């Protein structure tokens, strides 16, 4: 039997600084000390500087009277009585409004353009490609300024408004259109809509269980549509159609009645939607192209019709790729809506981090609150996305 | 005819005429544009749309436009008046840089574009020297020449900087600064040390969660509070710090996606050869990971370049703000479209060029090893 002639010596522990565990600990302690030191240095400087300038830190200023007007308020606000805290909420509501409008429009345009890029029609595909290459390579700020200063600010005065059907008017003050005015008893309709949504969800769950158990299908889509449209409409008529339209009318130099959409909102909305749509279009295109062609061929060899192939085979697999990317575009859109400051749309940054900050001088508190809003939106959405990814990721053996 | 012969006849496939030669304009038109009734209608509608949209633009921008002149009085036609741009051309390039010192900007810009061409053209030799020059030499030369105040050059404060020169400065500093910082952050986020990882995650998620404009606001209102009162911070420098930190977080995420795509065996093989952490990263992991994410890195560069225009909001005069300021000049009211179209063209050329180059690079570096 062969045996090693010399025994291998037991490895000693060696010097301490060669031990990876000790080194890692040492390195981390050093890093922590550096970070804490830097933070301490910054806090110390800030305190000294604030003292020297006579600024008192704290959030009391939120209860003080704001005293400046805001051009668009979705919640109750008056420059005489409302507080700085209220300006925060007003700005936040405006940010959320333009973001929501932008997300809806960007999704629609983005999907249409993305599908057009995949069209077998050469001309249409090229046109969509040109759209994408033009709009995603021009800064968003420039596009916002263009729509605002070059297009909407050059519109005619209210007296020479461009009008459509005598109820929509477009002029330098913005878009004026009929406003719905809810009468007594109108609340039943939105309640009916909510009930219909609950009903549709229940229907979908029951139908899926039934199909899993028996293999029988229900026509879920037509039934859902009927429920979603029919129930609120029926409720609306049964309660006596309690909705009146206030139509705008020109009186003197301005319009009375109706509702006015600020030109700033229109410009921001247009620019955000058109710009983000270019990115969404690319995501849609690459998402659909990421599904291997073999999948379509396999579906066809099972004699699945074209529409079902798209709906059941291609789209679900493309969605797995598309949803996280589209969501991050939505987040970008929300963050980009802060460019409103450049044209004076009263969003969170313009109202709160702009006017309120300038009036109170509470830079640290105001900037912290503003950044926390965006940060929490981002973190909540990414947490949801992680959940989605965990559920949707391929279960590999 | 007997029954057997009829059966064979039915079994044989009748001979068909040879396929028509495929090619030519008509074939292309038929398959790409008019392959069916729906497709034909789509083609015709699209064509009409293009003609309705594009022709007026060409007519306005090129055919009916005014090109030469020195004042508003020269804008006589119905089309665009490019005189608005040509009269402030030097401002668009140099900002408010003193007239007698503009040769310094010329040298830096010339060197900048020469180096870019040198690096981009595959045939030119000496890439290593050019890269070294671009990353070390150019920043030093640009700093000395643009700022001045040494070697007998008069000092030019950064508030006199502006236009294209400022846009390129911000973009270059942002790119050169954020990429290495991003690589370090990405490595930190994948570190095995929990504290290093935690710090990197917090740093990255913080910058990625807030809009750039709040970062710039912060750099202009809060940064002066953070440093000792006797330290004077230049406005441009403050913006540059904000931009660099902000984009390094995005860069880190791009690099991280590349690091994740590299097989674990690569690092383990390196360790088995006795390479330490940094050597392993430098020689094995990073070259592969960075090559994989070139498109993502360039996309971040493009986003950074576009977002340099945001300095308008904190009162720096980049290309866009110089033009924006020109629009409010009372002699030149009403030329907004010309101004914005020109600014858009400037940004578009740079961004489109970058994206095309990245596509080219991706093809050239593709060794066929990916999946």
Image (cartoon, coloured by chain):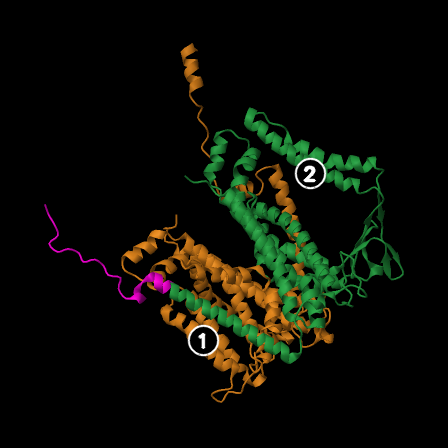
Residue closest to the eye, A60 or B301: A60
Chain B's colour is orange
Residue stretch rendered in magenta on the structure: A1-24
Q: Colour of chain A?
A: green
The answer to whether residue A38 is above or below residue A318 is below
Residue B165 visible to an observer of this rendering: no
Q: Residue furthest bottom?
A: B152
Residue that numbered label 2 is attached to: A197
Dot 1 crowding, Cα within 10 Å, few <14, some 14–19, many 20+: some
**Residue A16 falls in which quadrant of the image?**
bottom left
Magenta segment, prevailing SS (helix, strand or loop): loop
Counting from the top left corner in percent of width and height, residue A334 is at 63, 56
Residue identifier under label 1: B138
Q: Nearer the viewer, mark 1 or mark 2?
A: 2
The chain to which mark 1 is attached is B
A307 up-or-down from B293: above or below: above
Quarter of the rendering occupied by the N terminus of chain A: top left
Q: Secondary structure at mark 1?
A: helix
């Amino acid at each position: 039997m062969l045996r090693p002639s010399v025994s291998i010596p037991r490895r000693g522990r060696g010097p301490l600084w060669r031990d990876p565990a000790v080194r890692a600990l040492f390195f981390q302690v050093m890093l922590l000390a550096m970070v804490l030191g830097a933070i301490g240095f910054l806090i110390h400087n800030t305190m000294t500087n604030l003292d020297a300038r006579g600024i008192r830190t704290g959030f009391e200023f939120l209860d003080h009277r704001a005293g400046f007007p805001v051009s668009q308020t979705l919640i109750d606000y008056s420059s005489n009585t409302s507080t700085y805290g209220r300006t925060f909420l007003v700005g936040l509501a405006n940010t959320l409004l333009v973001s929501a409008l932008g997300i809806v429009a960007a999704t629609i345009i983005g999907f249409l353009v993305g599908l057009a890029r995949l069209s077998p029609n050469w001309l249409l595909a090229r046109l969509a490609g040109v759209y994408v290459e033009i709009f995603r390579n021009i800064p968003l700020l420039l596009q916002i300024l263009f729509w605002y200063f070059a297009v909407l600010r050059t519109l005619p005065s209210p007296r020479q408004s461009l009008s459509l059907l005598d109820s929509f008017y477009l002029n330098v003050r913005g878009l004026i259109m009929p406003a719905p005015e809810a009468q007594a008893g109108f609340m039943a309709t939105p309640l009916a809509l909510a009930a219909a949504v609950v009903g549709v969800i229940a229907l979908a769950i029951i139908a899926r269980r039934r199909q899993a158990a028996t293999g029988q299908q229900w026509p879920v889509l037509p039934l859902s549509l009927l429920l979603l449209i029919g129930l609120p409409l029926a409720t609306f008529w049964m309660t006596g159609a309690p909705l009146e339209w206030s139509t705008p009318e020109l009186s003197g130099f301005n319009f009375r009645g109706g509702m006015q959409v600020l030109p700033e909102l229109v410009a921001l909305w247009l620019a955000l939607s058109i710009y983000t749509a270019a990115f969404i279009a690319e995501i849609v295109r690459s998402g659909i192209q990421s599904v291997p062609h073999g999948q379509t061929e396999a579906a066809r060899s099972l004699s699945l019709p074209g529409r079902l192939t798209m709906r059941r085979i291609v789209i679900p697999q493309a969605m797995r790729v598309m949803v996280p990317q589209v969501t991050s575009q939505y987040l970008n859109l929300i963050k980009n809506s802060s460019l409103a400051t450049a044209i004076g749309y009263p969003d969170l940054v313009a109202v709160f981090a702009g006017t309120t900050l300038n009036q109170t001088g509470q830079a640290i508190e105001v900037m912290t609150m503003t950044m926390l809003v965006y940060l929490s939106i981002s973190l909540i959405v990414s947490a949801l996305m992680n959940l989605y990814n965990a559920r949707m990721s391929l279960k590999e053996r | 005819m007997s029954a057997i012969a009829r059966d064979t006849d039915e079994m044989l496939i009748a001979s068909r005429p040879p396929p028509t030669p495929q090619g030519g304009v008509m074939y292309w038109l038929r398959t790409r544009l008019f392959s069916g009734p729906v497709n034909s209608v789509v083609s015709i509608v699209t064509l009409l749309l293009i003609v309705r949209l594009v022709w007026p633009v060409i007519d306005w921008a090129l055919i009916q436009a005014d090109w030469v002149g020195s004042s508003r009085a020269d804008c006589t036609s119905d089309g665009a008046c490019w005189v608005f741009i040509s009269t402030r051309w030097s401002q668009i390039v140099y900002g408010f840089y003193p007239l007698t010192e503009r040769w310094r900007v010329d040298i830096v810009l010339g060197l900048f574009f020469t180096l870019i061409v040198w690096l981009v053209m595959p045939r030119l030799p000496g890439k290593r020297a050019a890269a070294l020059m671009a990353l070390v030499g150019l920043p030093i030369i640009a700093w000395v020449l643009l700022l001045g105040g040494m070697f007998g050059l008069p000092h030019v404060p950064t508030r006199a900087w502006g236009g294209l020169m400022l846009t390129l400065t911000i973009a270059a500093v942002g790119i050169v600064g954020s990429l290495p910082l991003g690589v370090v952050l990405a490595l930190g986020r994948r570190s095995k040390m929990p504290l290093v990882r935690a710090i990197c995650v917090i740093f990255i998620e913080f910058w990625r969660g807030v809009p750039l404009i709040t970062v710039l606001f912060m750099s202009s209102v809060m940064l002066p509070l953070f440093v000792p009162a006797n330290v004077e911070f230049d406005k441009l420098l403050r913006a540059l710090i904000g931009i660099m930190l902000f984009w390094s977080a995005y860069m880190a995420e791009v690099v991280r996606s590349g690091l994740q795509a590299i097989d674990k065996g690569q690092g383990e093989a390196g360790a088995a050869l006795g390479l330490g952490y940094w050597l392993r990263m430098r020689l094995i992991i990073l070259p592969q990971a960075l090559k994989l994410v070139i498109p993502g890195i360039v996309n971040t560069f493009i986003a950074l370049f576009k977002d340099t225009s945001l300095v308008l909001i904190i009162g720096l005069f980049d290309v866009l703000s110089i033009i924006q300021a020109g629009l409010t000049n009372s002699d030149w009211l009403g030329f907004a479209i010309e101004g914005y179209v020109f600014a858009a063209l400037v940004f578009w050329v740079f961004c489109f060029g970058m994206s095309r180059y990245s596509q080219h690079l991706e093809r050239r570096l593709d060794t066929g090893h990916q999946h």
